[in-house]
Image: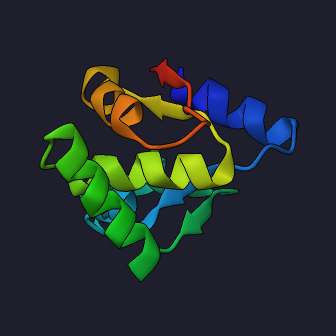
Amino acid sequence: MVIHLHRQALDERRRIIVPVPVLAQVWRGSARQASLARLLFGCEIADMTEHVGREAGILCGRAGKPDVVDAAVVVTAIHASAAILTSDPHDLAALVVAADSSLRPALIAV
């Protein structure tokens, strides 16, 4: 399903944003990651700036959640006015609700 959505987004010239902490969480650099490398094709890798880091930390505190990677995803999505594709919408939902933003990113379970 993710591969289909990725192809569709590329065909529609949509931005696909992968925050650096997400990349770090999944990348191991082995040859067995060819599928992941292909999936990263066409993606914009969003840096974890100090500003994003601070916002993610504040969001973790507000939501009572410890996962900075998830919080960085939510912060990045808010900044980009983007939806979030995730295999774990439950964890991200609390962060989306806790975000002090008029824009709440849609969570799309994959």
Q: Nearer the viewer, residue 13 or 76?
A: 76
Residue 38 visible? The answer is no
Above or below, comparing residue 29 to residue 59 in the picture: below
Q: At 64% from the left edge and 57% from the top edge, which residue is drawn?
A: 43
* Quadrant (top left, top right, bottom left, bottom right) of the C terminus: top left
Q: At 22% from the left edge and 50% from the top edge, which residue is drawn?
A: 60
Q: At 38% from the left edge and 61% from the top edge, which residue is drawn?
A: 23
Residue 90 percent location from the top left of the image: 27, 20
Above or below, comparing residue 50 to residue 60 in the picture: below
Q: At 38% from the left edge and 63% from the top edge, which residue is drawn?
A: 55
Residue that extends furthest to the right in the rendered view of this protein:
12
Q: How many marks?
A: 0
Above or below, comparing residue 66 to residue 11 in the picture: below
Position of 103 compared to 108: left or right? right
Q: Quadrant of residue 74?
A: top left
Residue 39 percent location from the top left of the image: 55, 48
Position of 9 compared to 43: left or right? right
Residue 12 percent location from the top left of the image: 87, 36
What scheme was used to colour the molecule? rainbow
Residue 99 visible? The answer is yes
Above or below, comparing residue 49 to residue 81 in the picture: below
Position of 89 compared to 10: left or right? left
Q: Nearer the viewer, residue 93 or 27?
A: 93
Residue 33 percent location from the top left of the image: 36, 55
